[in-house]
Amino acid sequence: MNSVPVRVKINDVWQERTVESRLLLSDFLRHVVGLTGTRVGCEHGVCGACTIILDGVPVRSCLLFAVQTTGCEIRTVEGLAAPDGTLSLLQEAFRDKHAVQCGYCTSGMLTTLTVFLSENDDPSEEEVREAISGNLCRCTGYQNIVAAVLLAAERSRKKEGVANG
Amino acid sequence: MADAPSAGTGVGASVLRNEDARLLTGKAVFVDDIDLPEMVHCAFVRSPHAHARLKNVDVAAAAKRQGILAIYTAADLGDYWQPGPLLVPPPPIEGLVFHPRTQVPLAKDKVRCVGEPIAIVVAIDRYVAEDAAGDVVVDYEPLDPVVDLEKALKPDHARVHDDLDGNVATHARQTKGDYATAARDAHRRIRRRFVYDHGASSPMETRGIVAQWDRKAERLTIWDTTQAPVIIRNGLAGMLGLSEHQVRVVAPFIGGGFGPKMMMFYPEEVLIPWICLKLGRPVKWIEDRLEHFTATTQERSQIHEAEIALAADGRIIGVKDEFLFDTGAYNPYGLTVPINSQCTLLGQYDIAHYDSTFTAIFTNKPIVTPYRGAGRQHGVFVIERLLDIAARELGIDRAEIRRRNLIPSDKFPYEQGIIYQDFTQLTYDSGNYAPLLDKALELIGYDDFMGTDHSSAARWTGKAVGLGLVCYVEGTGIGPYEGARVSIQPNGKVLVATGVGTQGQGHFTTFGQLVASQLGVAVDHVHVVTGDTDQFHWGAGTFASRGAVVAANAVADAAKIVREKTLHHASEHFECSTEDIVLADGYAHVAGVPHKRISLGELAQRANPLRGAVQPGTEPGLEATRYFGPTMGATAAGAHAMIIEVDLQTFTVDIKKYVVVHDCGTIINPMIVDGQIHGGVAQGIGNAFYEQLIYDDQGQLLNASFADYLLPTALEVPTMEVAHLVTPSPLNPLGTKGVGEAGAIPVGAAFAQAVEDALNRSTGDTVEILEIPLNPERLWRLWQPGSTSGER
């Protein structure tokens, strides 16, 4: 079994391990580093549950090998709330709009949408649906997730408005 | 958020969920999150053939791989190898033919579907286990598979079970009235062949099991994605030769259940704990998505030859139906699915004569057990389509023909005269159907739609628009029973423990609401434990839309008793009458004298003295355990309406509007109920147009991945409007009815009607849609002149 070193920054902390070259990034995060918040739904890149943010871009961690990420910066769902535990605006909106049922798709939704909202702070409903079209949910029928995103965007704009005077 | 006054947190309040913080931050623990020291991992060798004799299994090469601890086949299990239990014995139907055949832990002699497990490899990690599984050499003698339902009944056809004369698993007929005689005088008889195919539940989390044996405590802990932890505990304890108290089954956070996680004693569930005891190390098996398509149960098709007899005014005289049902390679779940179809066909309608026969057929495909709707979809489809055809042939508006047949609101309880899945005589406890129809018509804009000419628009845009409107019932809240223990902790928080598990439906919150309002505490001060047999070990599980009825009533009753005890202790403490005590904000205080108060936590401590004597009959603490078992199920009902647009070139569809009007009795948390309906409709949309398990004539599933088995995304599921009417159930103190499956049940029927309506409006031709699922290619074919639906 060949062993390859990996050095990757995850949620602002550098992690160094030695792993097999064929170890999936999803398995690395969950079982080597111990960050189990990233979920695995299909391992063939369709469901989006395993989505993490890699150098600012949402990607499927089931379609990457851990060793490919050396030198990169990863943010997982565990890194979305503030260090003191305060939920992000998006996480709070998910709660306020009942956008979570079983929670299994939630991590992937949050990472995908965190990037989306950073690029589009006033999305239309269609744009939100398009943004999550690569994240399958079997429980919510999506409508409360869409409502949560729109609410988060609105709250964010209000906050910016206040901040900007 | 904390310490909200109890008035806004009881029944009927849309309280935000207690469990969300953990799920939103990735802290919630699902089975695959459990990593234990020394844990080993399993992978299966599964049959690639739908039907074959097993001549030899050679594990020698596989066992040589570095990192392999053991490889087991059926022979290695010795006496432990046995077919699983029959989970649902057949109801007492006269003249019933029933051949139970259940699944085995590892195949011996014969494999009966693709994916059936043959050997299990135990290794230091899953990657190595899969490497070794690929090294196992199995010698098969392929046999002709049983795939087509109608061919399966022919004599001399291949047989799934060699010890039976054919492939019939069940033959059951239920009747009421006398259809043959009554139909003779009918003004019109309409007969059609319907095919309804339901698919794989596909929760985002697949199944998984972790087992750990504590050698010193002599206790086995099993984490399992099961909807029935108590029954799994009891069964496994028995099988493994342990006492029940030595086994703890924990159903942690589960990423969607939908029914197939209620199937019990799956081969994997039976094997993993056994291997754990044998090796003395924790053992994990997590199903991957490919396995899930064959190793987890699913639903599939029914073929109905149905006839409706009507009077000239559209009143139903009776229905006769004969249908075939694909039960798969084994039938541990008995008749549940087809009986649901049989009963639910009667719907909201006053039907005096009914003659329904079904034949369940063994096939060389995965086991069929309930998936959200559990066969109700099929029955609803048949009756709703028959009514639509009748409406067209008799020249009666489709809403009107339904209205004329609704069971009047003063006819409840309404006895249907046939037996339901809970073995009772099917009786609708309560209902008020006409207002559901009226509300659906209003919300969808029925008159407006019907008064508009859509055909010219279709010629201009190339898109045809149609409307679908269907009515349905959902039998919910069946027994046997559930229980709950409520106790006020010394720290003032309230603990609720119940045996049911949770897969996203919000039990941590809804059960909390019931307790919060009784005890005057904030909902987030109520800590609900579900699915842990160490905390509560009685009950049946989460299935068949019964949590809000059966478990909730047990919780409410236990809370009521705790309230009484609390009032009693407080009244003793303050030396006043219990009527003078108020429970609010976590305290018991004297009415009108707020500073004369004691916290519930302190009261709980005082109720558990460390010294002194107590009165005979005293129970310590502020705690109560109660059970609830309904006499029969409670019938929920609703109407769905939709407007759909069909592209006449690509035959893709776009749902422009979707409306649900539902009556599930008393609603504990409207936000959570609506969420259940949204999710059900989304699965219904998948069932209607995007999902289909496609098997070839060799029993091979051709689309065993999400790339080809299409789950609806946010682009396919519209925003829905949901309205509620409330007819409380007289069968339980809360007045609740279940709602988990409601969204999924009528969608196929609504879709077929709406698409048919769209196609017919655009051309004036008559396309009849008698099948679900549809898809663009199928619609295009039906659009061709001379084609017939329902032929497969």
Image (cartoon, helix red, strand yellow):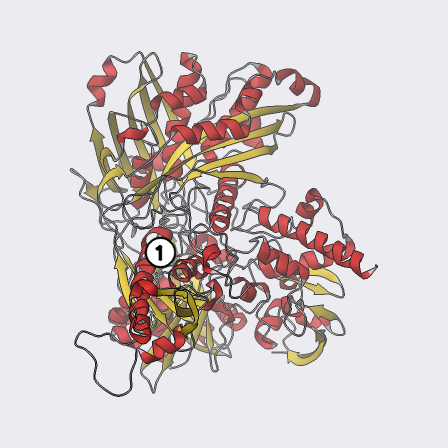
Location of residue A84 by image quarter: bottom right
Position of residue B136 measured from the top left corner of the image (x, y, whole percent): 45, 67
Q: Quadrant of the C terminus of chain B?
A: top left
Taking the view exactly as shown, the residue that stands out farthest to the front is B592
Q: Nearer the viewer, residue B655 or B66?
A: B655
Residue B470 in sight in this render: yes
Position of residue B220 measured from the top left corner of the image (x, y, whole percent): 34, 77
Position of residue A91 measured from the top left corner of the image (x, y, whole percent): 63, 61
| Residue B119 falls left or right of residue B773 | left
Q: Nearer the viewer, residue A135 or B657?
A: B657
Location of residue B620 by image quarter: bottom left
Which residue is drawn at the image coordinates 41% and 59% (left, top)? B517
Q: Nearer the viewer, residue A82 or B337?
A: A82
* Residue tagged 1: B552
Q: How many marks?
A: 1
Determine the secondary structure under disc 1: helix
Position of residue B764 measured from the top left corner of the image (x, y, whole percent): 56, 14
Q: Quadrant of the N terminus of chain B?
A: bottom right
| Residue B350 falls left or right of residue B8 | left
Residue B543 in sight in this render: no
Residue B468 drawn above or below residue B100:
above
Which residue is drawn at the image coordinates 51% and 79% (left, top)? B66
Q: Nearer the viewer, residue B205 or B740?
A: B740
Residue type at tag 1: Ala
| Residue B166 falls left or right of residue A9 | left
Label 1, residues with CA under 10 Å away: few <14, some 14-19, many ≥20? many
Which residue is drawn at the image coordinates 55% and 56% (left, top)? A100
Give the chain of mark 1.
B
